[in-house]
Image (cartoon, rainbow, N blue to C red):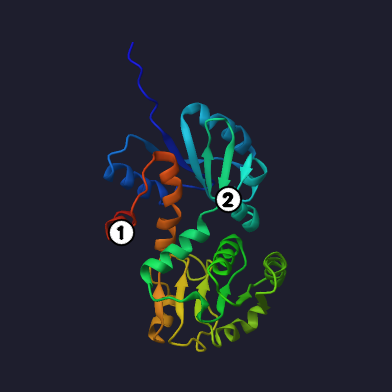
Amino acid sequence: MTDHPRIPLAGVIGSPVAHSRSPILHGYWLRKYGIRGHYIPMDIAQADLGEALRLLPKLGFVGVNVTIPHKETILGLADIITDRAALIGAANTLIFRKDGKIHADNTDGSGFIANLRQNAPDWNPAAGPAAVFGAGGAARAVVAALIEVGVPEIRIANRTRPRAEALRADFGAKVTVFEWVQAGNMLDGARTVVNTTSLGMVGKPDFRVPLDGLEPAALVTDLVYTPLKTPFLAEAEAAGCKVVDGLGMLLHQAVPGFERWFGHRPEVDDATRAAVLGP
């Protein structure tokens, strides 16, 4: 009887999950590097999450990505939580360790920074304040990452102010909260401008905050990548700003998980972008 090594399995869990581009991305990398493995989308309801996490390692899964609505809940089910996942209050990457423990991490912030570094190599985070629209889970990852790389001040506006205030309470004095109706005022002197909301995404309401306060020296990025160039980015580009779309964050946040699960650190390049965007 031949002893065949187990083929590593990974995937993404959420509900819904059919829209996720992660299977395309990881599938591309698996083929590119000739790795025997599979990456599978799994629609798992909140009520079944605990049972699924116990079962997946037994089926040969080495880890999973986590998306909405499980990114916060998962912290209560993991055995080991990284400091950054605890600070952000959410995890997007799980590793099923050989000792049976579930390791939870959040790579959104590092993916966000890697995207800016790759596509705006002259960006200097210490050059001035950052203006961040939104205060949800993605914003928390962005704020943590911006503080870590040395942004001196972070201005936040959210449609519901209490969420922004909660973020300030967690991240401290570097964070200043603005009323949503005055969000355009955050742009005065801002050198990094980030939309973390879903406004401007296909099928979502438009982004209506006035951007006439943008300065050409600002780097502007949108976490939305459908469409790739949102009206938010188009307006910033017309104002003379350097702009970076949100697709690169999706690609870069996936790198650490793939490396841990499949043993090879993948490269994010133009071919990767093209594969994920499709025809």
As drawn, 159 above or below 97: below
Quadrant of the image for the N terminus?
top left
Residue 226 visible, this angle = no
Q: Nearer the viewer, residue 39 or 219?
A: 219
| Residue located 56% across and 77% down the image | 131
Q: Which residue is mark 2?
A: 91
Type of amino acid under label 2: Ala
Q: Are marks 2 and 1 in contact (CB under 8 Å)?
A: no
> Residue 69: image x %, image y %?
59, 50
As drawn, 182 above or below 228: below
Horizontal arrangement in the rendering, residue 25 relative to residue 148 (left or right): left
Q: Nearer the viewer, residue 163 or 31?
A: 31
**Label 1 neighbourhood size at 10 Å, few (<14), some (14-19), many (20+)?**
few
> Residue 272: image x %, image y %?
31, 55
**Label 2 neighbourhood size at 10 Å, few (<14), some (14-19), many (20+)?**
many
Type of amino acid under label 1: Asp
Which sits earlier in the primary sequence, circle 2 or circle 1?
2
> Residue 84: image x %, image y %?
60, 55
| Residue located 36% across and 69% down the image | 119
Residue 269 — which label?
A: 1
Q: As drawn, which residue projects farthest toward the top?
A: 1
| Residue located 39% across and 81% down the image | 237
As drawn, 149 above or below 278: below
Residue 6 lies in quadrant: top left
Task: Compute the Cα span from label 2 to label 1.
Answer: 25 Å
